[in-house]
Image (spheres, rainbow, N blue to C red):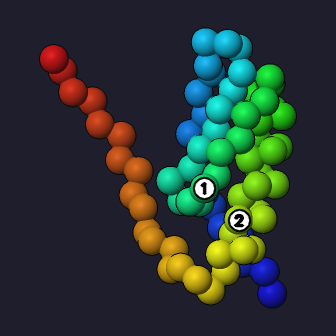
């Protein structure tokens, strides 16, 4: 039985107009495309392949995303 994993993509729009996606949970994940949708599609495929290749080699660490507001 396959287990669903939830990962967070960090996506930024580059000055050249492309989108760049990385993830802290999936080491080595880098995806770039002209549209947001294509970037997510590529990142999903890469994540799946990387996680399959890393299966059993590393433990998944728990990560907490905590939004913080700081007044300067």
Q: Which mark is residue 3?
A: none
The image position of residue 70, as x and y in percent, is: 21, 27
* Res 19 → quadrant: top right
- Residue 57's place in the image compared with 20, above or below, is below
> Dot 2: few (<14), some (14–19), or many (≥20) neighbours within 10 Å?
some
Instruction: Identify the residue at image location x=61%, y=34%.
Output: 11
Instruction: Identify the residue at image location x=41%, y=50%.
Output: 65
> Dot 1: few (<14), some (14–19), or many (≥20) neighbours within 10 Å?
few
Q: Which sits in the foreground, 57 or 48?
A: 57
**Quadrant, the N terminus:** bottom right
* Res 25 → quadrant: bottom right
**Mark 2 and mark 1: Cα distance apart in space:** 8 Å
Residue underneath mark 1: 28
- Residue 65's place in the image compared with 17, above or below, is below
Which circle's residue, 2 or 1, is located before the other in the chain?
1
Q: Does residue 57 appear to the left or right of 66 in the view shown?
A: right
Tell me whether the residue at label 2 lies in contact with that at label 1, contact meaning CB atoms closer than 8 angstroms: yes
The image position of residue 41, as x and y in percent, is: 82, 43
Q: Does residue 37 appear to the left or right of 26 in the view shown?
A: right
Instruction: Identify the residue at image location x=73%, y=34%.
Output: 32
In this figure, what is the number of numbered marks? 2
Look at the numbered disc 1 and give the secondary structure of its residue: loop
Residue underneath mark 2: 50
Instruction: Identify the residue at image location x=80%, y=24%.
Output: 35
Look at the numbered disc 2 and give the secondary structure of its residue: helix
Q: For residue 8, say whether it is visible.
A: no
């Amino acid at each position: 039985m396959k287990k669903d994993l939830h990962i967070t993509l960090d996506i930024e729009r580059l000055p050249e107009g492309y989108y760049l996606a990385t993830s802290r949970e999936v080491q080595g994940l880098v995806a770039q495309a002209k549209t947001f949708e294509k970037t997510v599609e590529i990142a999903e495929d890469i994540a799946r392949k990387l996680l399959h290749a890393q299966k059993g080699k590393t433990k998944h660490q728990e990560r907490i995303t905590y939004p913080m507001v700081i007044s300067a």
